[in-house]
C-alpha cells in the first residue's frame, strides 16, 4: 500500500511513519504538515491507497481535505487520526473507513490498515467472478451454469461496467453488433435476460443483478472479482493477470488494454 499522512503535529507524523515502516504491505508513506502540499502530491500520484488525516488543522480541515482527495482519487481510503471524539459522525459522512483517537498505539494503526488493504482480512465472498482468461462465476467454489452463452456474456458486460448501468439498446449493440435494433432483437434480448435471471436464481445469487427502468447493472458489493482487486492495485491481482481478459469477447479489448497499462506502471 502507498500511504500519505497529514497532520500539523510533527511527532504524530513521525509515529505514523515508524509504525507503517514495520508493516510488510506498506510500500511507502509520505508525510505532510501542510494539507495543500498533500493535495499537490496526490494530484501527481494517483496510486495512493490510504490517507491518515488529522481533522483540526490550520488553513484546511481534515474533512475538507478528505473531500478533495476523494475527488482526485475516488478509491482512496480515508482514516482520521484526531484527539476529538465529536468529529466521528462528520468523518463517516465523507466515507472514512477508520477513526483513530490520539494518543494511538501501533495496534490501532495496524488494525485500520488491515481494513484498508485490498487483500486484507475480510470474509471470503461466496461469489467469486473470474475475468482474467475466460469469464466464469463461482459460488462456494462451484461454477455457475449458464444455459445460454449470451446470458453469460451479458453478465460479463455488466461486470466489466463495474456497477454502471447498461440500457437494453446499449447491451444489444454490444452483444449483437451486426443486428438492427428492432423488435426481433429486443425480443431476443428479453429471452437472454430471462435466461440470466434463471441462472442466477438457480445459483442462489439473484441479488447481484439490478434491473430498474430498462437499466441493468450488478451490485459490486455482492461478489469478489479479480479485475476489481486489480483496479485497487492489489499486487496479487496484478500478478495474476497473464495478458488475457474475458477471452472471446471482442468488446473487452479496451479494458484489456487499460489493465495492461496498470500492469506496466507497476513494473
Image (cartoon, rainbow, N blue to C red):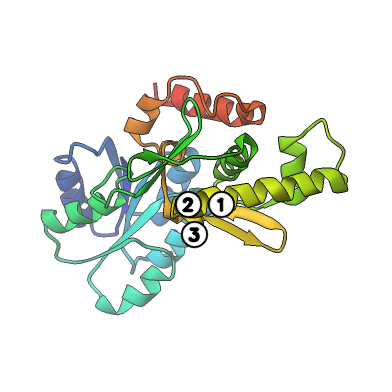
Are the residues tagged 1 and 2 within 8 Å (C-beta)? Answer: yes
- Report the Cα–Cα distance between label 1 and label 2: 6 Å
Badge 3 marks a residue whose secondary structure is helix
Q: Position of residue 59 (x, y in %)?
A: 43, 64
Between label 2 and label 3, give the one nearer the viewer: 2
Quick one: 191 or 64, which is closer to the camera?
191
Q: Is there any visible trace of residue 32 in the rendered image?
A: no
Left or right placement of residue 132 versus residue 188 in this view: left
Q: What residue is disc 1 on?
A: 198
Q: Nearer the viewer, residue 226 or 52?
A: 226
> Measuring 22% from the left and 71% from the top, which residue is drawn there?
83
Residue underneath mark 2 = 202
How many marks the image carries: the answer is: 3
Please name the residue shown 45% across and 25% down the image.
263
Residue 86, image x and y in percent?
Answer: 29, 80
Horizontal side, residue 34 vs residue 11: left or right:
right
Q: Which residue is mark 3?
A: 207
* Mark 2 → mark 3, Cα distance in angstroms: 12 Å
Q: Label 1 to label 3, Cα distance in Å? A: 12 Å
Q: Position of residue 177 (x, y in %)?
A: 78, 32
In the rendered image, is residue 195 in sight?
A: yes
Instruction: Indicate the quadrant where residue 78 lies.
Output: bottom left
Task: Assess disc 1: are there few (<14), some (14-19) or many (≥20) residues with their C-alpha within 10 Å of its C-alpha.
Answer: some
Q: N-terminal of the two: label 2 or label 3? A: 2
Q: Quadrant of the C terminus?
A: top left
Amino acid at each position: 500500500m502507498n500511504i500519505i499522512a497529514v497532520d500539523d503535529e510533527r511527532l504524530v507524523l513521525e509515529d505514523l511513519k515508524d509504525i507503517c515502516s514495520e508493516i510488510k504491505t506498506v510500500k511507502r508513506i509520505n508525510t505532510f504538515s501542510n494539507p495543500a502540499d498533500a493535495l499537490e502530491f496526490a494530484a501527481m500520484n494517483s496510486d495512493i491507497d490510504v490517507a491518515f488525516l488529522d481533522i483540526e488543522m490550520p488553513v484546511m480541515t481534515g474533512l475538507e481535505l478528505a473531500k478533495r482527495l476523494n475527488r482526485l482519487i475516488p478509491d482512496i481510503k480515508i482514516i482520521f487520526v484526531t484527539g476529538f471524539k465529536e468529529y466521528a459522525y462528520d468523518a463517516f459522512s465523507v466515507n472514512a473507513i477508520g477513526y483513530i483517537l490520539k494518543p494511538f498505539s501501533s495496534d490501532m494503526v495496524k488494525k485500520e490498515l488491515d481494513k484498508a488493504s485490498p487483500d486484507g482480512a475480510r470474509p471470503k465472498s461466496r461469489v467469486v467472478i473470474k475475468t482474467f482468461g475466460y469469464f466464469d462465476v463461482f459460488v462456494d467454489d462451484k461454477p455457475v451454469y449458464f444455459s445460454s452463452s449470451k446470458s453469460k456474456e451479458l453478465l460479463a458486460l455488466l461486470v466489466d461496467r463495474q456497477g454502471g448501468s447498461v440500457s437494453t439498446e446499449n447491451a444489444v449493440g454490444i452483444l449483437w453488433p451486426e443486428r438492427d435494433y428492432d423488435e426481433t432483437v429486443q425480443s431476443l434480448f428479453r429471452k437472454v435476460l430471462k435466461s440470466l435471471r434463471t441462472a442466477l436464481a438457480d445459483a442462489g445469487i439473484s441479488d447481484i443483478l439490478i434491473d430498474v427502468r430498462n437499466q441493468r447493472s450488478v451490485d459490486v458489493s455482492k461478489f469478489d472479482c479479480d479485475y476489481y482487486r486489480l483496479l485497487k492495485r492489489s499486487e496479487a491481482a496484478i500478478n495474476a493477470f497473464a495478458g488475457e481478459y474475458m477471452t472471446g469477447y471482442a468488446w473487452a479489448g479496451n479494458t484489456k488494454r487499460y489493465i495492461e497499462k496498470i500492469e506496466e506502471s507497476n513494473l
